[in-house]
Image: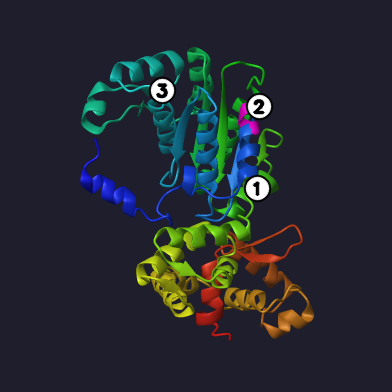
Amino acid sequence: MLSRLDKDIIQMESPFIFDRYVTGKYFIGRKRECNILRNLLEQKENVCIYGPPKTGKMSVIRQTIFNMRMAGGQFTVADVDLFNVRSTGAFLKKFGTAVIRSVASAPSEYEEIIRELLPRTNFSFDHEKFSAEDEILTLGATPDGNDIRGMLSLPGRIAAARDTSMFVIVEDFHNLLRLPETEYENIFHALSEVFGKQEKNAASHAAFILTGSKTNAMKFIFEERKYFYRQVEHLPVSNIDERDQIDHVVRGFLTAGKVVDNELIAGVVKLFRGNIWYLNHFASVCDSLSKGYMNEGILMDALGIMISIHEPGFKAITDDLSVYQLSFLRAVLEGESRFSSTEAVEKYGMNSSANVRRVKDALKKKEIITFNEKEEPIFLDPLFEYWMDKYYFERQ
């Protein structure tokens, strides 16, 4: 039974959710992506999804899984988050812990899985460490190739042993690039080996969903170096239709008895370039500032609050930029596209076309800009782009 407080909290929950991924009635747009992902998973394909932070990648994945379960799908999901991984051993233990916990809940089950499905590896179950630190996997030595291959093939072995299907979501997959090159290459080659042995016609199987919020790093893995060529399908996550975004905000305000002009929200949608996290955060701030009609003044106050929240981070980014990098970003904001031309090099003080290339590579590595198929520059963070334009360069 829900208490009165619980019911009040549920009734007061904002329609503008930005602190977690969303599913169900709070999920908007991207039906096409959900349908494609569902088809790929049902065909036992591995998938990679990447894009800037907070653009709805996990919501697409979770909504797809929700849809599949509602349709009667029977499968297990393991979620591995690599945001704090800085070594091969840490990666293998985190990966294995998530996979094992997705199918087991008792120490005896953990021990059995490790003993039966990770033979001839340096992994074991230590009862004392489990009691003291809740550690499921103990790694007895520096991990070798056998440990890596054994761990990465564990989802498939569990699926086969239990006659089920398993989906392994690996978040922040790009963080493996923080390891020394020889180490991340060993992991990538072992994972490619596992993918090569997957049986697409088997009733039980394990499929991987590799996600990342470092766009250029993920492009490096899957597009430039092609580590998993023809083994992983890339699912692009496009922007939610502008009309759907506008309707979402207007409808959210109406539930609280508040009104806003569609054209004002259309301007906000364009500013945030489809970043639904920013849009929900902005709308939530507006909601807290008004008891009735949302006028332009309230929207500008909300934007000011958003800027004040993110400005320390934005200043930290610019403090780390060289004069050349700042000049390049100014050129981007001013619509320049021929960065290596003599005119552009002279106008923005870039010294030489070779220096332009170095600056471009540095800004990509810092995940500030990326380039599309036409080699056109794109700021990855729309609010940072706005702040650079209006506050840093003070362009009108």
Instruction: Give the residue drawn at x 72%, y 65%.
Output: 376
- Figure quadrant of the C terminus: bottom right
Disc number placed over residue 43 in the picture, else none? 2
Q: How far apart are marks 2 and 1 (CA)?
A: 18 Å
Q: How crowded is mark 2: few (under 14 residues within 10 Å), some or many (20 or more)?
A: few
Residue denoted by label 1:
236
Residue denoted by label 3:
103
Instruction: Give the residue drawn at x 69%, y 79%.
Output: 351
20 versus 229 height, above or below: below
- Where disc 1 sits, the SS reads loop
Instruction: Give the residue drawn at x 60%, y 26%.
Output: 194
Mark 2 and mark 3 lie on one chain; the one further toward the N terminus is: 2
Disc number placed over residue 378 in the picture, else none? none
- Figure quadrant of the N terminus: top left
Q: In the rendering, at what x and y percent does residue 320 appear?
A: 48, 70
Q: Can residue 176 be seen in this view?
A: no
Q: In the rendering, at what x and y percent does residue 130 appear?
A: 26, 27
Q: Distance between the residues labelled 3 and 1?
A: 30 Å
Whether label 2 touches label 1, CB < 8 Å:
no
Q: Quadrant of residue 216?
A: bottom right
Q: Which of 53 and 219 is in front in this view?
A: 53
Q: In which quarter of the image is residue 192?
A: top right
Residue at the extreme front of the image, as rendered? 257
Mark 3 and mark 1 lie on one chain; the one further toward the N terminus is: 3
Q: In the rendering, at what x and y percent does residue 323 appear?
A: 57, 78
Query: In the rendered structure, which amino acid carries the disc numbered 1?
Result: Pro
328 versus 104 height, above or below: below
The mark closer to the camera, 2 or 3, is 2
Query: In the rendered structure, which amino acid carries the disc numbered 2?
Result: Gln
Mark 2 and mark 1 lie on one chain; the one further toward the N terminus is: 2
Q: Give the range drawn in magenta.
A: 39-44
